[in-house]
Image (spheres, rainbow, N blue to C red):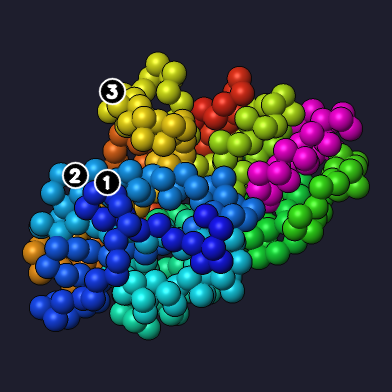
Amino acid sequence: MNSRRQFLELGAAGGVLAAVPASSAWADQGVTRDQIVLGSIQDLSGPLVTLGKPIQNGMIMRTEQINAEGGIHGRKIRLVVEDSGYDPRKAVLGAQKLLTQDRIFAMVGSLGSVVSLATIPLVIEKNVAHLFPTTAHHGNFDPFHKLKFALATPYPQSTAVGLKEVVKLSGAKRVGILYQDDEYGLEVLRGTESALKDLGLALVERTTYKRGATDFASQMQRLRAATPDLIVLGTIVRETIGAMATARRLGYTGQFFGSQAAYMPAVPKAGGAAVEGLFAISETPVPYRDDPSNTRSLNEWMDAFKARFKEDAELWAATGWMYVDIFARAAERAGPKLTTDSLVKALEDHPYPRGFLGNPEFVFGPQKRLGNDQTRLAQIQGGRWKTVSDFLR
């Protein structure tokens, strides 16, 4: 895709369809006698393309499955995906197109805090539901609005829960932190400080880096001088690998713990021996096809994904698949006369259960727009992520 505003439209047979005006038989846009239009904003060309592409593919897969089974009360899903390049300005343009030209019924699974926070006001102004953005920022459910539904436990809460579990497992007493010098990093810092306060501990050292940094020598020298036995990382993929590799070269032998942003399939794949032993928190586990503990349902799902896209299924493909599945279950329960209000009521009244992908239960309510407050601890063992705890809260 090379156009400035790229999109994918999936109809009954997975082909490209022209926009169809909403029928006057329904009060809300994006629903006609035979179609429901969903929109999503993904990064298909920027720094988060390794997340955006599999999320999109997971959404495509579930959409095609639902349409092949007859749709939702006879309506096929049409999925329209805009490329933001992880740029909030492009995201706003994409959202405007989805809302006014494609006339979407719901915005589903948009990727990134800067994208979701920039586009939420546009979405809810059109009385369109903003569902399940791929970000752990609290602004996706707070302040309360009936049309804002989020799945990811916020960084401060999940970091605090996970750090307490790591301290319990490792016996760490001296904790330092490296975090990105922005709102994301500050959220990880807040969670770290909260956990340590509850544990009666204090940070022995803290240091930051600028977004996009590749050299962590000075930060790791500073942390190592404070002799921590555990370092918290408010980092993402590249920075997680770079920081840990630098620390190991400097002779640091202690433990590392990262937020949800460090729990990425690419970290053990690209980091190799340097990231072995890293703890991080997760909600849905990274699937591996050769894992003997897999259920038959999970293996069949992974095989179907690979057959469709010629790529191995991974965490973000599972995430995109779930976004459409959660929507579809709620839309089915909302009944033949689907409206925004009936969709909201169905989401509030019917939890989404734990499933074969390993997800937690997602529960909303009339005054509850964060569907999950649980997380699990994972560790890189033998070059892959392994879940090492049950759900924690």
- Look at 41% across and 45% down and name the residue there: 57
- Look at 47% across and 32% down and name the residue there: 311
Residue that carries the numbered disc 3 in the rendered image: 296
**Range drawn in magenta:** 226-254
Q: Amino acid at mark 3?
A: Arg
Q: Amino acid at mark 1?
A: Glu
**Of marks 3 and 2, the one in the foreground:** 2
Q: Quick one: 126 or 307, which is closer to the camera?
A: 307
Between marks 1 and 3, how big is the CA–CA gap? 21 Å
Q: Assign a secondary structure to mark 3.
A: helix
Q: Assign a secondary structure to mark 2.
A: helix
Estimate the x, y position of residue 151 in percent, counting from the top left: 40, 56
Residue 171 visible, this angle? no
Q: Are marks 1 and 2 in contact (CB under 8 Å)?
A: yes
Estimate the x, y position of residue 323 in percent, counting from the top left: 35, 52
- What is the quadrant of residue 89 in the picture? bottom right
Whichever of labels 1 and 3 marks the residue nearer the N terminus, that label is 1
Please determine whether, in this image, residue 389 is positioned above or below residue 110.
above
Between marks 1 and 2, how big is the CA–CA gap? 6 Å
Q: Is residue 140 left or right of residue 205?
A: left
Estimate the x, y position of residue 127 in percent, counting from the top left: 31, 79
- Look at 83% across and 36% down and name the residue there: 246
Residue that carries the numbered disc 1 in the rendered image: 64
Residue that carries the numbered disc 2 in the rendered image: 68
The answer to whether residue 159 is magenta is no
